[in-house]
Amino acid sequence: MIPKIILGKGPHATRRTIGYLFGKGRANEHVDPHLVASWNDFAPDPGRNPHRDPKEVEAQLVAQLDQPVKMLGHKAPQYTVWHCPVRAAPEDPILTDAQWADIARRIVAAAGIAPEGDTEACRWVAVRHADDHIHIAATLVRQDGRRPQRDYDQRAVQREARQIEVDYGLRRLKPGDGTAAKRPTSKEHFKAKRLGQEAATRDVLRQRVRRAVAAAADETEFFALLEATGVTVRLKRGPSGDTLGCNFALPGDTNDKGEPVFYSGSTLAPDLSLPQIRQRLATTSPEPVTARPGNPWHQATAATERIPHHLTHGDDPTGQGQLVALGAALDLLPVTAPAALKAELEQAAAVFERATRSRIAADLDSTRVLRRSVQAIWKDPTRHGDGAGLAMLLDVALTAVAYAMHWHRIRQHAQQEAAAEQALVHLQVAYAQVAEPVLVGLASRAPSPQTKRRFAHHLHEAVPEHAERVLADSAWDALATVLAEAEAAGHNPATVLDQALSQRTLDDAHSPARALTWRIRRLAERHAPGPQAEAARARSVTPRQAAPVQPGAAPPAPQPPPGRRR
């Protein structure tokens, strides 16, 4: 259940609010508007008074609501109307008028508008014009002429809404920490529908600004990318001429004067103010030491594979920084993905956005490689045309998102945990779609039975506890193919297999052969060690001992939390 408080000011604020609530709505969406409750339980109802002109009854209701305000004259407060829509979730049962009336009384009591038993409290009404929500409208002067005690009313109303969900068996929303992005209003939704937009302007702008931040190497490129995606930018400058902030608008989204409707970055999301954007861009600005040349898909995969280690062994700012970088990677993946995957990846990025913010300040210093490699992918996504690069990145991203869910859970970040869990579902669907054809292609090039038996022998020696699972896995032929390709490139298959096994346990892997396939695919593209290096390694490592991780490889990660099954 979602309550939202809106304040109204001006001499006609009450009349405007009541006129809207009993009107047809902006898109004729108001059906049978009527009162379900009021401060005295017998206020005039413009929607249910067949013997009088509704406009006359409406004027009478406005006059009664406004009476305490008018009594104060010029001493009346600046804001005179308290308006709170309360909406149930789509899957909730349809509540009766009596149930909505009870909910309205509980909301105004929690907010301090009309405490239970207070006969001198503010005047208010609850109007219902749809199955799934009501609107509560109150005037902000008590009947004894005093102001209501409504300190922190938004928090109090949210707390009461959580209890109402329990009492009525409704969908239970997660408590927040004040870092969520602002939701589009009903007015914004209806406007988007009139303009033929699939989403409200606020949501469209937030997605485009986030993508521009993820893709840009500096501030100049950030603004250029926004212009290229059709976003109008208006800079706010100080007396010195320095840029202090920026506002964003979409073409065609105008007010009643025909002027563009601008949104400041901070109203799109708390981390999209210009200072926050500049801080993010600083992690990808050119430096004397840049990321090593190589396959950007593999670099991004290796950096993402290290995220669980940072989340379990790093401090909170480092962990938060890793989640910011992971969110940026997910923001750009839909742009680089095949058309069939875009919808799922866009949904994953949209919901995981909530998991990238908390009250913990992010340390972004350790995220440079991931951000730069994902930017390189964005600039040239066809580097791995067979989809293997995307499949490998999604494979480790699934584990990283599962760790993110666990990281937020132990810190009691309920909304962020739920967001990561939702993102995991979308990523699993996308991963299954992209991985299957790649694995089928690899399996079609499987080596001879004799070679496969030799690889199976290496497997039994290296990891006897998982060998039978791997050999029975449907991805075994694909794994044998990448081992053969690694051998052809000059690698020792047993050594590569040991290195792949040392990167992370197979205990959590739903498909251990598939997990090993992606790891060996990456390892095989590295420079093969010479004979002397191989001989030295053979002298120092026993067959059952894990090989050390090569420079740049992910450190061994701890046991993943429940929920991640590949």
Image (cartoon, helix red, strand yellow):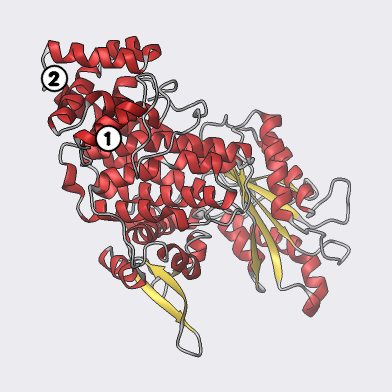
Q: Position of residue 198 (x, y in %)?
A: 34, 50
- Label 2: how many Cα within 10 Å (few below 14, some 14–19, many 20+): many
Describe residue 303's horizontal placement relative to residue 472 as left or right: right
> Label 1: which residue?
391
Front of the two marks 2 and 1: 2
Residue 279 vs residue 125, the one in the foreground: 279
Q: Which residue is mark 2?
A: 446
- Residue 362 appears in the figure: yes
> Relative to 144, is 392 on the left or the right?
left
Q: Position of residue 411 (x, y in %)?
A: 63, 41
Q: Secondary structure at mark 2?
A: loop
Mark number, residue 371 = none
Q: What residue is rendered at 34% in x and 21% in y?
A: 512
Nearer the observer, 259 or 391? 391
Q: Is residue 440 left or right of residue 74?
A: left
In this view of the protein, can residue 44 be seen by the observer?
A: no
Q: Indicate the amino acid at tag 2.
A: Ala
Across and down, in percent, residue 482 comes to: 19, 27
* Disc 2 from disc 1: Cα separation: 19 Å
Amino acid identity at mark 1: Ala
Q: Residue at x 31, y 41 (%)?
A: 343
Q: Secondary structure beneath disc 1?
A: helix
Q: In the rendering, at what x and y percent does residue 18 appear?
A: 62, 58
Nearer-the-camera pick, 88 or 490:
490
Give whichever of discs 2 and 1 has the lower sequence position: 1
Where is 32 relative to 472, above or below? below
Q: Can you tell which quarter of the image residue 387 is in?
A: top left
| Residue 465 figure quarter | top left
What residue sits 14% from the left and 34% below the top? 489
Q: Toward the viewer: 403 or 23?
A: 403
Q: Quadrant of residue 444?
A: top left
